[in-house]
Amino acid sequence: MKELSVRKLAPGAAIAIDGRLDEPAWQAAATTGPFVNVGTGREDRSLPTQGEARLLWDDGFLYVGFDVSDRTITGGFPEGARDPHLWERDTVEVMIDPDGDGDNKDYYEIQINPQNLVFDSQFDDYNAPRGGPSGPFGHEAWSAGLTSAVALRGTLDDGSDEDVGYVVEAKIPWSSFAKAKAAPPSPGDAWRMNFYAMQDNGGAAWSPILGEGNFHRARRFGRVRFVAAEGEAGGAGAPAAAPSAPAGPKPGYRADPPDR
């Protein structure tokens, strides 16, 4: 099981949500390392999207920064669309189970695409509620209340050139997680999360699914442990990513079944 210790921002430190992970805090932040094949748990350079994520936190927000490699950056949704099906094209995704028990009760899904559009929803149980093949998926009325920015390394929706990728930066208020036992968390608390770089309903993950369902399978989410700021009680040691998961039994780009 993947694990990541995430350092709290030092008092007085600030993160500007501008799509640039250039603050010193981001440079020192905990990182997932390269995402892996969802079926094998191994790095797979043949996948059309690659990525990694960085995490920080403070008493007000969870901060997430994605760096995605993608040679064909695709948006394709109407400007200002609410909860569009971002997984059908290019997007990053965060799954969050605040209880940390992996039972799929009361978890959250947040996606942000290269257009800086957002899909966010809250689920009572594994993929539930679900309104059918076209949704709604979960309680789509829920809003993460996040602030986000995207920086493109390429041109959106232009197949005539080769792109490099894009960066997504977001801060998510703890107050949005009404189903959590405690938000913000305290140093030492652990939540279950997963992170994906997606294209066409498939993608690469921080913690692989290994054939145990689709991208919503909370028992396959990694553990994110919150660590106090340097110099605060409980703030000794440096955040570090756990070693990559061993190879799993089921290779593939998409989860089994697909995410939707």
Image: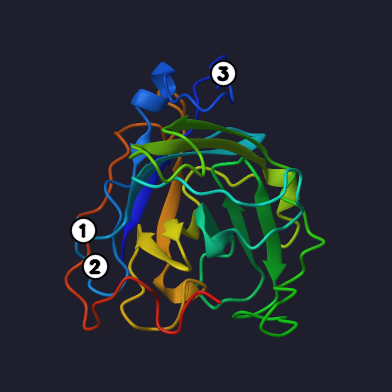
Q: Amino acid at mark 2?
A: Gly
Which residue in the structure is indicated by mark 1? 244
Identify the residue at image location x=36%, y=74%. Answer: 209
Q: Please tell me which of labels 2 and 1 falls first in the chain.
A: 2
Q: Is residue 237 above or below residue 188?
A: above
Q: Please tell me which of labels 3 and 2 falls first in the chain.
A: 3
Q: CA distance from mark 3 to mark 2?
A: 34 Å
Which residue in the structure is indicated by mark 3? 14
Q: Which mark lies nearer to you, 3 or 2?
A: 2
Q: Is residue 38 above or below residue 95?
A: below
Q: Which mark lies nearer to you, 2 or 1?
A: 2
Residue 245 visible to the viewer: yes
* Viewer-side residue, 86 vs 41: 86
Would you say 95 lies left or right of 77 here? left
Identify the residue at image location x=63%, y=34%. Answer: 59
Q: CA distance from mark 2 to mark 1?
A: 7 Å
Q: Is residue 56 above or below residue 1?
A: above
Mark 1 element type: loop
Q: Amino acid at mark 3?
A: Ala
